[in-house]
Image (cartoon, rainbow, N blue to C red):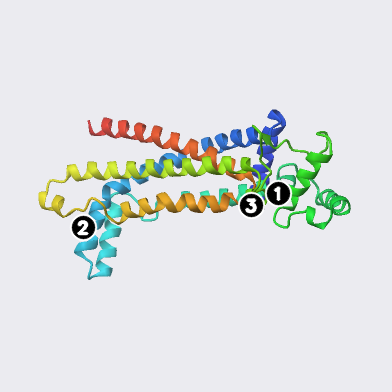
């Protein structure tokens, strides 16, 4: 994971050297990363639409062979094979997102190591200086490099090799909300992140529901239509996620440097735009194929 954080650090520092602002560099970095992952996003959204379309067939098989697990699994595999899909479609994307998240967390947690490529001994020298000048408690146990970064920013010149301009429209992106509860500005970015998370989940849920409604219209058997429930387990799960994910996001955002929350916020905004545009594009593509 450290190697990925280091690779991201090279890119982020290159951008930072151009713009001289940590926040703007994170935004540009987020856009570049989203563009690189765009082919994967297109494939993922196609998979989501295809999965929604065969969901009713999956439910039929589950009901038909509910007492024969082996036969149900065989029929399910045949269905996925016929539709040219894998039951594990989307797993690769989810795993990749987890790796990226952990790598970026490591990057914003240790910006001097991964972004500025500062030698560990130089960082330790600053820690010693801080202990002598400010006391042992001046260094955060969770984010020691953030403590050094703040010390350099407040006590040295911007010519220092450890200096990073973390001011972003009045918000210090090196702050950790949990450690700065008396500073209202630390809650701005996490709050915006939560709002965009809710919006993103609602958009995804609405898209899935729309796909499901389209499939129901195409079903010719009227008895099957009567048996269908408007709110199945998937819909209920999406509704639960609408509240669960923001709560989880807040808990993480409160204990991480604001640089991570800014990356998440920008990523959410880009993801919302991406889903809306791709959904419209894929729908037009599908209509052309059917027409």
First in sequence, mark 3 or 2: give its number: 2
Q: Position of residue 85 (x, y in %)?
A: 34, 50
Tell me if label 2 and label 1 are in contact, CB under 8 Å.
Answer: no
Q: Secondary structure at mark 1?
A: loop
- Displayed quadrant of residue 69: bottom left
Q: Report the residue marked by disc 3.
A: 178
Relative to 146, 241 lies left or right: left
Q: For the point 26% across and 56% down, which residue is it? A: 58
Q: Report the residue marked by disc 2.
A: 60
Calculate the distance from the C-alpha at mark 3 to the C-alpha at mark 1. Answer: 18 Å
Q: For the point 30% across and 47% down, which residue is it? A: 52
Q: Position of residue 98 (x, y in %)?
A: 53, 52
First in sequence, mark 2 or 1: give its number: 2
Calculate the distance from the C-alpha at mark 2 to the C-alpha at mark 1. Answer: 51 Å
Q: Report the residue marked by disc 1.
A: 110
Q: For the point 81% across and 49% down, which residue is it? A: 123
The answer to whether 85 is drawn above or below residue 173 in the figure is below
Tell me if label 3 and label 2 are in contact, CB under 8 Å.
Answer: no
Neighbor class of circle 3 (other Cα within 10 Å; few <14, some 14-19, many 20+) is some
Tell me if label 3 and label 1 are in contact, CB under 8 Å.
Answer: no
Calculate the distance from the C-alpha at mark 3 to the C-alpha at mark 2. Answer: 49 Å
Nearer the observer: mark 3 or 2; the answer is: 3
């Amino acid at each position: 994971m450290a190697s990925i954080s280091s690779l991201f650090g090279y890119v982020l520092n290159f951008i930072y050297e151009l713009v001289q602002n940590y926040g703007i560099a994170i935004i540009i970095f987020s856009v570049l990363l989203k563009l690189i992952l765009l082919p994967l996003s297109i494939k993922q959204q196609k998979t989501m639409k295809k999965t929604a379309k065969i969901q009713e067939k999956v439910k039929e098989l589950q009901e038909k062979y509910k007492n024969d697990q082996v036969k149900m699994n065989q029929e399910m595999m045949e269905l996925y094979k016929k539709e040219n899909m894998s039951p594990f479609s989307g797993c690769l994307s989810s795993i990749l997102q987890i790796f990226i998240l952990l790598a970026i967390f490591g990057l914003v947690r240790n910006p001097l190591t991964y972004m500025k490529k500062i030698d560990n001994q130089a960082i330790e020298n600053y820690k010693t200086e801080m202990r002598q000048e400010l006391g042992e408690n001046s260094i955060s146990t969770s984010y020691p490099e953030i403590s050094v970064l703040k010390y350099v920013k407040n006590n040295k010149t911007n010519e220092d090799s450890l200096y990073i301009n973390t001011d972003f429209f009045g918000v210090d992106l090196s702050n950790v909300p949990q450690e700065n509860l008396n500073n209202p500005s630390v809650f701005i970015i996490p709050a915006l992140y939560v709002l965009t998370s809710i919006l993103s989940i609602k958009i995804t849920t609405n898209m899935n529901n729309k796909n499901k409604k389209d499939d129901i219209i195409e079903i010719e058997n009227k008895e099957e239509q009567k048996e269908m429930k408007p709110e199945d387990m998937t819909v209920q799960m999406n509704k639960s996620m609408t509240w669960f994910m923001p709560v989880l996001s807040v808990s993480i955002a409160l204990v991480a440097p604001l640089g991570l929350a800014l990356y998440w916020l920008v990523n959410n905004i880009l993801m919302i735009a991406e889903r809306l545009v791709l959904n419209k594009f894929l729908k037009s593509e599908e209509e052309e194929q059917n027409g």
